[in-house]
Image (cartoon, rainbow, N blue to C red):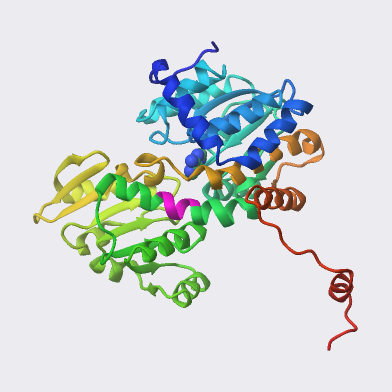
Amino acid sequence: MRKSHIQDIKLAQMGRLRMEWAAREMPVLRHIQKRFAAEKPLKGVRIAACLHVTSETANLMVALKEGGAQVTLCASNPLSTQDDIAATLVRHQGLAVYAIKGEDKKTYYRHIASALDCRPQITMDDGADLVSTLHERRGPLLEVLGGTEETTTGVIRLRAMEKANTLKYPIVAVNDAKTKHFFDNRYGTGQSTIDGILRSTNILLAGKTVVIAGYGWCGRGVATRARGMGARVLVTEVEPLRALEAKMDGFEVAPMQQAARQGDLFITLTGDVAVLDVGHFKAMKDGAIISNSGHFNVEINLVGLKKLSRKVRTVRTFVEEYTLRGGKKLFVLGEGRLINLAAAEGHPASVMDMSFANQALAAEYILKNGRQFSRKVYPVPEEIDAEIARLKLKSMGIAIDALTLQQKKYLNSWEEGT
Ligand code: ADE
């Protein structure tokens, strides 16, 4: 067994069963895994992956391993690790894993450092903590060919590094592939966020006022699902175009200070800091529930909330009750960490299938082309995106039409208008 730091190796059998369950819904990744097993395109390549340690991630790890890679995995969030999955990856797949659900901040960064000790040639990140930690180490990072980034927040951070000229190696922005964010961010976050909120609170959504902060792909996914369950949905935004979209999609739109007075449940998905701040907590109703599904817990000013409070206690698993000085109670879910992974199991396997197909193919792409790249953030090639969409449709038994020659000619011409 490679050196690891996990909660309990005895959970391995349970993890193995859950991993198999997820695999049933990941036909595209399975297809890639079969090819990888035959061709070994990643032979001998050291990959450090900093991802949510879930049953879906486990299947990606196996696909990379089958492709010949030597994979080391650490958690991309202190609360998202599934300990049984970490255990099966160590016991049954021979991976080195550094991840424990509920680890403190120090352990979280120690785990990232341990993963980096494998001297990765490829990094696979979700939120850019692995890349930023690697950049903080001294040295030119000569061995690193490139990396991939899974999430919007991570891509934003990496683009900022590119702009500041501090990015030391190329990154492929998996998040920006259409087969990733159209589906994972929208339908994945949409369903799993509601799942996490319901598992932790068991509240009825019908008849509630739900305030969604941010109408990006994730926000619109959650807004749509909350409406589908009978909630009145109010959206807050800072970008006029997105606010307009939200309005025309049929949602109410208001500034947070106004929404704060009305919400029964708040969900932040903006990627920014202090979206829910002291002024908002003061305006909220007694009993309001506060949660975050953005990558980092900075969206809710928990320090400010604590300062307003005279008492904090845990009243259910993943539910903390803050009693403010005037007696009002506000409830924070999952310590403000992404609720879909803290209190539920993250996105369902069927969408992660496409996200992780992108990850696997992006790793292969980096290996083939990384040496020609500069220190920039690159998109996933369109052919990879199109291939994943084609494979997913095929796995669902869905056939679609093809353009006729006449139609192709028409689309390529400008003379014919009528
Ligand atoms: N991000 C969101 N859901 C996830 C999942 N199920 N596995 C890995 N990363 C995720």
Quadrant where the image shows the C terminus: bottom right
| Left or right, 136 with reference to 248 | right
Q: Is residue 138 visible?
A: yes
| Left or right, 10 with reference to 360 | left
Position of 290 relative to 357 (above/below): below
Magenta stretch: give its range: 188-192
Q: Position of residue 379 (x, y in %)?
A: 70, 50
Q: Position of residue 267 (x, y in %)?
A: 35, 56
Magenta stretch contains residue 267: no
Quick one: 315 or 285, which is closer to the camera?
A: 315
Quick one: 104 or 6, which is closer to the camera?
A: 6
Quadrant where the image shows the N terminus: top right
Residue that appears at 77% across and 26% down: 38
Q: Main secondary structure of the magenta part?
A: helix
Q: Position of residue 385 (x, y in %)?
A: 70, 51
- Name, please, the residue furthest toward the front: 397
Position of 360 relative to 403 (above/below): above
| Left or right, 283 with reference to 157 | left
Q: Is residue 135 visible?
A: no
Quick one: 153 or 188, which is closer to the camera?
A: 188
Residue that appears at 54% across and 51% down: 184
- Name, please, the residue furthest toward the top: 1
Position of 134 relative to 274 (above/below): above
Q: Position of residue 197 (x, y in %)?
A: 32, 50
- Name, please, the residue furthest toward the bottom: 418
Number of numbered labels in the structure image: 0
